[in-house]
C-alpha cells in the first residue's frame, strides 16, 4: 500500500486521452485492482515532450512546471506519469529548477504572470511502471493474479526516456527507481503475472518515435530492430510502457513487413493490458481491439 | 598511423597506397593510409559563445572529447549512421569550424533526443541539448536551412499553443500534407484514421480538447517565444 501521507497526483499527458486511450483504460483497471488512487490533474497541459526544448528552453521548462505546480497545489508529493516523454519533461523541469537559479527566477515570474501557483521544485516524478512495481510490491501483484499468463513469452521494451538521464529521473540512485542501464521492473511485474520474459539486446534503444513522420528511415529502422530482436528471442508479444513507443512501432508494422518480411512481426501491447488479463479481465476490457497491431490472435490461442 | 574515424576526413585529403615502403621498410596494410597536410584558417570564435549563451547549450565547453556519447549514441552506433557524431559536432563548435559543421546540416537534426549521451557523459555535458543548440545556431546564422526536424518541432509547437494540449491527428495531418512522406499515402492514412476514429479516441479540429484557462498561459508563452526569436506560423 502506498503510504497515506504520500499523496500522488496523476498526470495523464495528451496521448492518454488520444491515441493511447487503451493504455489509459487498462491502467485505470490495474490501479483500481491494486488500490492505487488515481488523482488526475484537472486541466493539465502538454508537457512539451522533446519538441519544445528545441525551440525555447524557457517554454520547455515552463510548460511542465505548470503541471507540477498544479500537482503540488493538490497536496501531492509525487506525480505519476504513464509516458516516457512526460516523465522526461517533468523531471527535466525539476532539474532545471534545482540547478539553475536564473532559470528558477524567470520561471517564478512566468508562473505569477499566468496566474499559476508558485512551485517548490520538490514534487517527485514517477513512471506508472515504478509506482505499480514499488508502491504496491510484487507480492500484492501476485496475490491479485487469478489467471496466470503461463506459457506467454513477452519481450519487455522500456524505450529511451523512462530512466534517462539518471541525473533527472534519479534512476539507480533513489529508492523505488529502476536501473538506468538494465531496467527490469516490467520483467518483474510480468513474471509475477506468470509470463516468461525473454532477454534481448535492445530493451532501451530508441524507437525513433520522436521522428515517426519526420525521419521515416530511422523510425522504421529502430522499430524493425526491436521487433526483430524480440522475434529472435522467441517472444510472442512485445510489451511497452509508453504511448509514443507503442504507436510508433505499430504504425511502422506495414512498412517493416514490406521491407523485412512478416516473420519478424510481433504484436505490440501495453504492459498494463497484460497485467489486467492476468487479473482476470477480458481482452475487451483491456481494450486490446483498440491497438493497431493485432494481439488478439495470439492471446486467444493461448486461452486468454 | 592507423586512422580512426576515417569517415571524418574528406576523401581527397586521404592518401591510400596499395603498397607502401618507407625507408626500405614495407608498411603496407594497416599503415598504408596518410592524411594530406591541410591548413584551416577560417575559424568563428564567437560560434561557441553563441551556443553557450543559450540555456540548453551552456555545457558545451565542459566537453573533454572522450567520445563516450558517440560510442553509445542510438543513431551513430545502434542505427549505424556513422556521419552522425555528437563528439565531433561539439569539437567543431568549440573550435568554431563552421564550414565543416555546414557539411552536416542535413545530419545534425536527425538526433532523436533519446538522451543516452546525456545519461553517460562523464563531464555533465547535456549532449543532446547542445547538439540541438548547435543546429539552432547554424540555422540562425543562415549557415544551414530548415530541416524536416525543425519543421516538425514547429508544427508541434503551433499545435499545442492553440489549446494547451496536443491534437495528434491534427498534427499528423498538417505535417503529412506539407512534407508528403513517401509511405504516408492516402490509403495508409485512411486506414489509420478509420481505426482511430472507430476507437472513438480522437477529438480533432474544432472539437479538439483544450486546457481550461489556457488563454492566460498562452499569452505568457507567446511572450517567451517572441523573446526567444520565434515567429509563430499563424
Ligand atoms: S561524452 Fe561528454 S565529455 Fe565525452 S565527448 Fe561526449 S560530450 Fe564530450
Ligand atoms: S540524444 Fe541524440 S545524440 Fe544523444 S544518443 Fe540519442 S540520438 Fe545520439
Image (tube, rainbow, N blue to C red):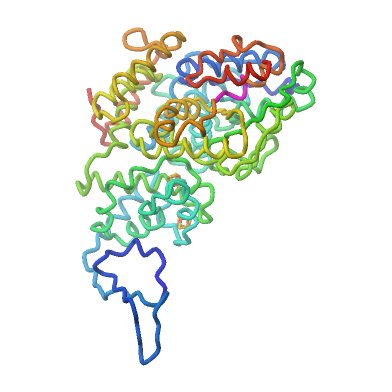
Picture coordinates of residue A25, whole percent (x, y): 57, 13
Seen in the picture, residue B191 relative to A189 is either above or below; the reply is: above
Seen in the picture, residue B134 relative to A265 is either above or below; the reply is: below
Picture coordinates of residue A74, whole percent (x, y): 58, 17
Residue A110 relative to residue A87: left or right: left
Q: Residue furthest left?
A: B142
Seen in the picture, residue A100 relative to A137 is either above or below; the reply is: below
Q: Is residue A272 magenta?
A: yes
Q: Going 57% across and 36% down the picture, which residue do you hit?
A: A230
Q: Nearer the viewer, residue A35 or B107?
A: B107
Residue B215 showing in the rendered view: no
Q: Nearer the viewer, residue B44 or A25?
A: A25
Residue A251 occupies quadrant: top left
Q: Is residue B60 magenta?
A: no
Q: Which residues are magenta?
A: A268-273
Residue A44 showing in the rendered view: yes
* Image quarter hosting the N terminus of chain B: bottom left
* Image quarter hosting the C terminus of chain B: top left
Give the total number of marks visible in the rendering.
Answer: 0
Q: Nearer the viewer, residue A96 or B29?
A: B29
Residue B103 relative to residue B53: left or right: left
Q: Residue furthest bottom?
A: B24
Residue B221 relative to residue A22: left or right: left
Residue A2 occupies quadrant: top right
Q: Going 68% across and 26% down the picture, which residue do you hit?
A: A152
Q: Nearer the viewer, residue B13 or A60?
A: B13
Amino acid at each position: 500500500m502506498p503510504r497515506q501521507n504520500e499523496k500522488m497526483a496523476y498526470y495523464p499527458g495528451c496521448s492518454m486521452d488520444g491515441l493511447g486511450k487503451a493504455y489509459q483504460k487498462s491502467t485505470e483497471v490495474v490501479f483500481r485492482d491494486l488500490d492505487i488512487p488515481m488523482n488526475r490533474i484537472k486541466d493539465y497541459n502538454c508537457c512539451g515532450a522533446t519538441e519544445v526544448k528545441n525551440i525555447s528552453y524557457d517554454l520547455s521548462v515552463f510548460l511542465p512546471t505548470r503541471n507540477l505546480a498544479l500537482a503540488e497545489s493538490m497536496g501531492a508529493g509525487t506525480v505519476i506519469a504513464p509516458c516516457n516523454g512526460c516523465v522526461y519533461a517533468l523531471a527535466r523541469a525539476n532539474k532545471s529548477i534545482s540547478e539553475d537559479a536564473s532559470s528558477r527566477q524567470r520561471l517564478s515570474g512566468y508562473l505569477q504572470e499566468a496566474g499559476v501557483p508558485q512551485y517548490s521544485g520538490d514534487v517527485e516524478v514517477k513512471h506508472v511502471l515504478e509506482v505499480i512495481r514499488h508502491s504496491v510490491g510484487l507480492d500484492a501483484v501476485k496475490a491479485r493474479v487469478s489467471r496466470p499468463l503461463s506459457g506467454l513469452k513477452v519481450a519487455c521494451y522500456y524505450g529511451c526516456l523512462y530512466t534517462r538521464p539518471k541525473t533527472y529521473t534519479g534512476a539507480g540512485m533513489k529508492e523505488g527507481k529502476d536501473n538506468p542501464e538494465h531496467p527490469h521492473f516490467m520483467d518483474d511485474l510480468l513474471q509475477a503475472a506468470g509470463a516468461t520474459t525473454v532477454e534481448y539486446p535492445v530493451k532501451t534503444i530508441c524507437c525513433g518515435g520522436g521522428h515517426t513522420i519526420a525521419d521515416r528511415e530511422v523510425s522504421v529502422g529502430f522499430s524493425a530492430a526491436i521487433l526483430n530482436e524480440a522475434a529472435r528471442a522467441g517472444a510472442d508479444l512485445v510489451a511497452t510502457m509508453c504511448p509514443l513507443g507503442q504507436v510508433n512501432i505499430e504504425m511502422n508494422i506495414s512498412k517493416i513487413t514490406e521491407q523485412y518480411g512478416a516473420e519478424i512481426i510481433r504484436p505490440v501491447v501495453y504492459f498494463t493490458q497484460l497485467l489486467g488479463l492476468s487479473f482476470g479481465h477480458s481482452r475487451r476490457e483491456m481494450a486490446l481491439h483498440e491497438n493497431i497491431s493485432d494481439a488478439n490472435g495470439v492471446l486467444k490461442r493461448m486461452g486468454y | 598511423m592507423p586512422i580512426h574515424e576515417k569517415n571524418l576526413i574528406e576523401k581527397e585529403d586521404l592518401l591510400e597506397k596499395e603498397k607502401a615502403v618507407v625507408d626500405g621498410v614495407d608498411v603496407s596494410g594497416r599503415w598504408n593510409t596518410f592524411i594530406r597536410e591541410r591548413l584551416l584558417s577560417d575559424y568563428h570564435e564567437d560560434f561557441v559563445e553563441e551556443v553557450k549563451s543559450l540555456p540548453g547549450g551552456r555545457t558545451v565547453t565542459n566537453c573533454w572529447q572522450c567520445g563516450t556519447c558517440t560510442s553509445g549514441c542510438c543513431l551513430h552506433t545502434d542505427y549505424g549512421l556513422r556521419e552522425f557524431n555528437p563528439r565531433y559536432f561539439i569539437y567543431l563548435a568549440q573550435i568554431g569550424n563552421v564550414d565543416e559543421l555546414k557539411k552536416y546540416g542535413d545530419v545534425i537534426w536527425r538526433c532523436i533526443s533519446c538522451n543516452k549521451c546525456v545519461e553517460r557523459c562523464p563531464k555533465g555535458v547535456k549532449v543532446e541539448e547542445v547538439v540541438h543548440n548547435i543546429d539552432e545556431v547554424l540555422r540562425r546564422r543562415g549557415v544551414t536551412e530548415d530541416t524536416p526536424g525543425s519543421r516538425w518541432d514547429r508544427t508541434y509547437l503551433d499545435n499545442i499553443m492553440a489549446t494547451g494540449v496536443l491534437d495528434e491527428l491534427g498534427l499528423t495531418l498538417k505535417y503529412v500534407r506539407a512534407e508528403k512522406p513517401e509511405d504516408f499515402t492516402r490509403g495508409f492514412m485512411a486506414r489509420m484514421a478509420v481505426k482511430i476514429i472507430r476507437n472513438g479516441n480522437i477529438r480533432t479540429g474544432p472539437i479538439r480538447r483544450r486546457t481550461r484557462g489556457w488563454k492566460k498561459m498562452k499569452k505568457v508563452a507567446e511572450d517567451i517565444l517572441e523573446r526567444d526569436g520565434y515567429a509563430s506560423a499563424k
